[in-house]
Amino acid sequence: MRTKLFLPAAAMVLFLGGNGAAGDPCDPCPVRAYRVVCETVWDEVPVTTYRTVRETVCEERRITCYETVWETAMHERRYTVARPVFETAEREERYTVQRPVYETVVRDCSFDRVRSVIETHEREERYLVAKPVFETAEREERYVVPRIVTETAEREECHVVHEPVTTMKTVLVDQGCYVEQQVMRPGAVRMRLQWLEPACAVDPATGAVVEQRGGLHWVPVQGPAVCEVQRVWKPNVVERQVPETTLVARQIVRKVPYQVQRVVHDECVRKVPYQVCRMVQEEHVRRVPYQVCRQVVERVERRVPEQVCRMVAEECVRKVPVTTCRIVHEEKVEQIPVRVCKQVAVEKTIAVPRCVEKCVAETVICRRPRVVLRYVPCEPCCP
């Protein structure tokens, strides 16, 4: 396929005479004119290319799954039922009855009669007479002398110690896996020469409408889409207990010795003489007459008869019917169906897809352009 490309700027016109030399325009001989035309010739060249082909291969893998199986089991439930039983019996009831008994009793109404008798007596009266006596004595005088004493004491100091404490914390962990999935990727955009018809177009730089000449132009062409197998992460969030160690503050009290100086007051004793006047008591005796009034008690006998009523207790017995209710406990057994859930291990064979890549050689025909110059005769310039 050949395509003619006309380049007006590169066109050159040659004027040749009959003998092949450039002629004068006033020459009556006819002049032959030629112009140079550039033609683009496309040569087809075979090119070997290699493309990557991905194939999905399935591998068999045995896994162990746990299936939930529900079973119905019978459980025995034992319970105790209380049943009332009524019984009638007789009991003896003893009670006491008070019966009056009248008796004649002699009551003693004797009394004492008091009579006063006056008598004269003498008593010895002793009295003391004080006589002053002067003596020299010594007294103890106590005084205090201060003295500094150093002692070792202990005080409590509090300080904080951080200790590690481990606790379990629930953390969400992603235990997903990679999954192969097919993705359509659009082809690459390349600039290629393409024949375009004359048309009006808009200049993107100025925005004006310009006339586009027909011919070969560089046009962006998108290649075919490619289907690729892509590994995609499939999340699987699982809760997991993770130990977490934190520092907990704890207060510790310790005893720190320190020295304390205090002032101790020592007591000293010294003897000081002084004169004392004391009174000495002398005892004297004298007789003093006095009268005494003495009480004389005389007994007067008197007895009075009287009637007394006293209550005599008598015990009686009677029978009273009594109804007794007692509780009898009976044990009963009841069968209860219970659904039990257990996990059963089941081995399965699954096919795991795996992507395998290999290179395939292809032969592609490519076109390479080359420019060919050609002379084209023009019409003569003279009539």
Image (spheres, grey):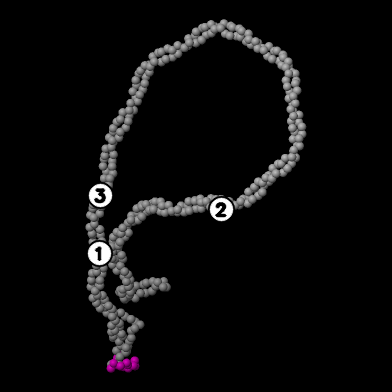
* 129 vs 168: above or below: above
Label 1 close to label 3 by CB (< 8 Å)? no
Is residue 376 visible to the viewer in this orientation of the structure?
no
In the image, the segment drawn in magenta is 19-31
Residue 356 marker = 1
Relative to residue 227, is residue 5 depicted above or below? below
Which image quadrant for residue 83? Answer: top left
Is disc 3 placed on a helix, strand or loop? strand
Tag 2 secondary structure: strand
Q: Work out how far the residue at label 1 is from the one at label 3, CA to CA, in angstroms.
A: 33 Å
Rendered residue at 30%/88% (across/down): 33
User: Does the magenta portion include 257?
Assistant: no
Question: In the image, what residue occupies the spot 72% across and 40% down?
Answer: 137
Label 1 and label 2: CA atoms lie apart by 83 Å
* Amino acid on which disc 1 is placed: Val
Of mark 1 and mark 2, the one earlier in the sequence is: 2
Residue 39 drawn at (x, y percent) = 29, 81
Q: Answer with left or right where residue 288 lies relative to residue 61.
A: right
Q: Which mark is residue 345?
A: 3
